């Protein structure tokens, strides 16, 4: 069994928890989807920092330019960046997945004020902590994002690649598949862009980016047991943070969104 296979096996229980999370059963109305989106958008946003951290480490972006240390790593990250930062937006143009998500939120009527406030604060030089305070960002969302940046700052390139691969690219096609199953039953025309966003993630991450990210893990960690241990710690932290975020969103829906009336049930 390879290092990669052992790592995947060790993460299987957390993956199962996420794939069978009670959150999906609560996405039963447009209002519930709006609650989900206003929290989840922060995960869409901070994903790009994981990607950009890897791009800084693995591609030739320094001046004066120097060749990348890993040709394969450079190729993989640049291909993934192309899709994540400038994908087909379904409207004849191009957009990052974050921008596509914001457009989906606006179409659905979801509240974008918190994420917009954070971006605006960061653009004028505020720290992440200050931006979160100004935007009154929920605690569970803050903890999720802080986990991401702790991994970026403390876990090295193998840890970042692992969080990227097993906490995002390798996981999201399956997780989003659960959500797509209920989106189609929702308000006609209000979630079209959100469904397109999900379909693009399933297509790119499931068919291309997930496989490429696993190749990247093999390239970076090779046969170094310490690097694979670093990768495991980062992946566990990333998945734990996702579970906590999913719990918080489900709790918020339970407390703020009434269950729909279903004829014949009492």
Image (cartoon, rainbow, N blue to C red):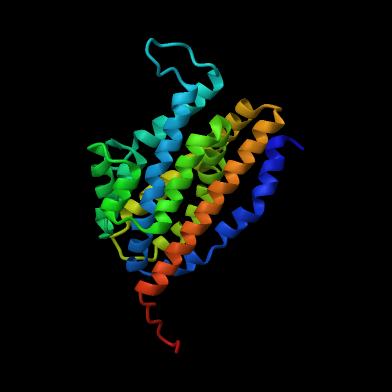
Q: Is residue 266 visible?
A: yes
- Write down the quadrant of residue 189 in the picture: bottom left
Tally of marks: 0
| Residue 144 vertical position relative to residue 215 in the rendered view, above or below | below
Q: Quadrant of residue 85?
A: top left
Q: Residue 252 at x, y = what percent?
A: 40, 68
Judging depth in this view, the residue of 247 and 91 nearest the camera is: 247
Q: Nearer the viewer, residue 78 or 126?
A: 126
Q: Is residue 149 above or below residue 261?
A: above
Examine the rendered structure and indicate whether residue 138 appears above or below residue 5.
below
Name the foreground residue: 47 vs 1.
Answer: 47
Indicate the position of residue 228 as horizontal and vertical percent values: 66, 35
Q: Residue at x 40, y 34 (%)?
A: 83
Q: Quick check: 228 left or right of 148? A: right
Q: Residue at x 47, y 53 (%)?
A: 176
Mark yes or no: residue 207 visible: no
Front-lying residue, 261 or 151: 151
Q: Position of residue 134 (x, y in %)?
A: 26, 51
Residue found at the very far right of the displayed protein: 1
The quarter of the image holding the C terminus is bottom left
Image position of 35 (left or right of 205) = left
166 lies above or below 12: above
Q: Quadrant of the N terminus?
A: top right
Who's the residue at 68% across and 42% down the image?
7
Q: Residue at 25% across / 49% down in the picture?
A: 117
Q: Position of residue 262 (x, y in %)?
A: 40, 82
């Amino acid at each position: 069994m390879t290092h990669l296979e052992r790592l995947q096996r060790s993460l299987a229980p957390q993956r199962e928890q996420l794939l069978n999370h009670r959150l999906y059963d609560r996405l039963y109305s447009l209002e519930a989807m709006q609650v989900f989106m206003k929290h989840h958008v922060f995960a869409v946003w901070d994903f790009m920092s994981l990607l950009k951290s890897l791009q800084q480490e693995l591609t030739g972006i320094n001046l004066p330019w120097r060749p990348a240390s890993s040709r394969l790593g450079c190729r993989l990250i640049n291909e993934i960046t192309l899709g994540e930062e400038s994908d087909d937006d379904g409207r004849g143009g191009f957009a990052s997945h974050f921008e596509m998500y914001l457009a989906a939120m606006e179409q659905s009527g979801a509240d974008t004020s918190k994420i917009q406030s954070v971006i605006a604060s960061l653009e004028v030089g505020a720290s992440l902590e200050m931006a979160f305070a100004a935007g009154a960002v929920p605690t569970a969302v803050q903890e999720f994002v802080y986990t991401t940046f702790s991994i970026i700052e403390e876990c090295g390139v193998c840890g970042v690649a692992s969080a990227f691969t097993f906490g995002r690219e390798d996981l999201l096609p399956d997780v989003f598949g659960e959500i797509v199953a209920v989106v189609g039953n929702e308000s006609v025309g209000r979630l079209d862009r959100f469904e397109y966003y999900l379909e693009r993630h399933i297509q790119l991450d499931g068919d291309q980016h997930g496989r490429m990210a696993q190749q990247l893990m093999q390239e970076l960690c090779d046969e170094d047991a310490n690097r694979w241990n670093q990768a495991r710690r980062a992946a566990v932290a990333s998945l734990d943070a996702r579970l906590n975020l999913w719990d918080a969103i489900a709790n918020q829906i339970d407390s703020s969104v009434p269950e729909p009336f279903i004829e014949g049930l009492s």
